[in-house]
Amino acid sequence: MSILDIRVLGDPILRQATTPVTTISDDVQRVIDDMFDTMYHARGIGLAAPQVGRTERLAVLDLDNDPFVIINPEIVHSSSGRAKGEEGCLSIPDIYADVERPKTVTIRALDRHGKVFEREAGELLARCLQHEIDHLDGKLFLDYLSVLKRTAALAKWRLAADDYPGYIRRVALETPEDRNEHEHPDEEL
Ligand code: GNR
Ligand code: NI
């Protein structure tokens, strides 16, 4: 398996809609394995294909030791109840903001064997599923912020963007200290 480069805000691939997977080929299986590898290395709980430069409609997730892949996912039900929670994105390092989303969702997707499954989720898993499916539609959590908060987030991002030439974040080269910093950006200030 290999750790893939993560594309960051500004790479047009993050704004493109993805293409449904028609065959779960060896190539797709390998991308899935590499995406898990990359997600674990970057300490994320989800990773969508466009974040590693791919156009397939698929994402991987792992919250508390339950790895799973969603292929061609769709949200088949969203609760009317909403919840606010803090989000971050491996493609927008060090930027965090509260986002309001439906509290629970039911998604339908294919697993890595091509079998259809449905999954109802609440709490952080519901949030993460929505965040990943948004990626597959070219959407980012920044899009939900007020103009004021988005402007502030983008101003902060502009200062950090120089660290990612070509909109590429080479997580393979990041030290454990770097990754810890991304996870707890303010603790050492
Ligand atoms: O690692 C991640 N954490 C997270 C926290 C709150 C809401 C969504 C997420 S997903 C994110 C990884 C990522 O960027 N996935 O696309
Ligand atoms: Ni993300």
Image: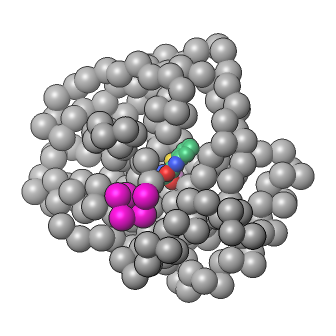
Q: Is residue 58 highlighted in magenta?
A: no
The answer to whether residue 137 shows anywhere in this view is no
In the figure, 97 relative to 126: above or below? below
Which residue shows up at 69% across the image and 69% down it? 188
| x, y percent for residue 12 | 55, 67
Outermost top residue: 80
Outermost front residue: 188
| x, y percent for residue 155 | 81, 69
In the figure, 95 relative to 158: above or below? above
Does 15 sit left or right of 18 as displayed? right
Q: Is residue 41 highlighted in magenta?
A: yes
What quarter of the picture does the N terminus occupy? bottom left
The magenta stretch spans which residues? 39-43
Image quadrant assignment for residue 39: bottom left
Q: Main secondary structure of the magenta part?
A: helix
Which residue shows up at 26% across the image and 45% down it? 21
Which residue shows up at 28% across the image and 61% down it? 37
| x, y percent for residue 54 | 36, 62
